[in-house]
Image (cartoon, helix red, strand yellow):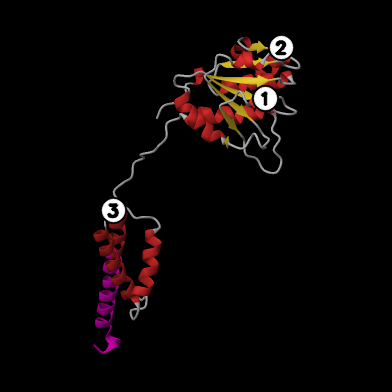
Amino acid sequence: MNAVRLDNVSIVLQKPRYSENIGASARVVRNMGMKDLLVVSPENFDLSKVEKMATHAALPVVEKIRVFSDLKEALAPYGYIVGTSARLGEQRQAMASPSQMARKLVSVAQSNPVAIVFGPEDRGLSNEDLRLCHLLVNIPTAQFSSLNLAQAVMVICYEVFCAGLPRAETSFVPRLASRHELEGMYEQLKDILVRIDFINRENPDYWMNLLRKFFNRLPLRAREVKIIRGICRQMNWYAGKCYQDGLKAVKNDPASGQ
């Protein structure tokens, strides 16, 4: 499975109101392996506040921040644009989830520069802004749908980062017990459980069906069937030994009259 080309993905903040959110977003970009952060018409851009929230580790992202006055100008070089929105409406019907969006970017970002756009904290992207986008994405929430800007950036960037991580699609599965092996185990179990009076000898299949349902939920490996059958053999041997020891004790007891 291909990974998302993170160097082809840029985060765009449209008209952010607080420098602290720009810095926190830069930190997210750095954490999730991206490099490019664009800021369009920021209401405030206090570099000292941006750097403080970004921390020292994200300064390489802060130093390369590009500031634009117009969203169309900022998005001009990008072949694919994703818009984020917390609000639903007539013009915001077809929205992808963050994971759906991220899976799409796995292929799109291989050969296309991608921009993911976030709107201002108080009102989000306008309908005019969203018309520039190829795909709209919505972060599902409970009844309260307002996320902090940096939180929203984190959710989206995390999904993009995770979309290309290796997945254990073909994990190792040991050999499971065959039907023949299972039936042999069930017959042996029934025999020993009847002999020790654990199940009713008049209707053993009723109780065995309960055991079958229990084992079918696992399911059993071939090695585990061997262990269970070994336990049954040991129980059978021990029960027989106790019986023989009892016979010897009676035979050697003078009071028994034998």
Mark pair 1, 3: CA separation: 63 Å
Q: Which residue is mark 1?
A: 128
Q: Which residue is mark 3?
A: 222
Question: In which quadrant of the rendered image does the N terminus lie?
Answer: top left
Mark pair 2, 3: CA separation: 65 Å
Q: Amino acid at mark 3?
A: Ala
How crowded is the residue under tag 2: few (<14 C-alpha within 10 Å), some, or many (20+)? some
Q: Amino acid at mark 1?
A: Glu
Write the residue at 67% across / 43% down: 142
Is residue 22 on the magenta stretch? no
Q: Quadrant of residue 191?
A: bottom left
Residue 198 visible? The answer is no
x, y percent for residue 240: 26, 72
x, y percent for residue 88: 66, 37
State yes or no: discs 2 and 1 in contact (Cβ < 8 Å).
no
Q: Is residue 178 above or below residue 49?
A: below
x, y percent for residue 219: 36, 55
Stretch in magenta: 233-258
**Foreground label between 1 and 3:** 1
Write the residue at 39% across / 55% down: 218
Look at the magenta stretch and give its main secondary structure: helix
Q: Which residue is mark 2?
A: 47
Q: Element type at marker 1?
A: helix
How crowded is the residue under tag 3: few (<14 C-alpha within 10 Å), some, or many (20+)? some
- 77 relative to 190 in the view: left or right: right
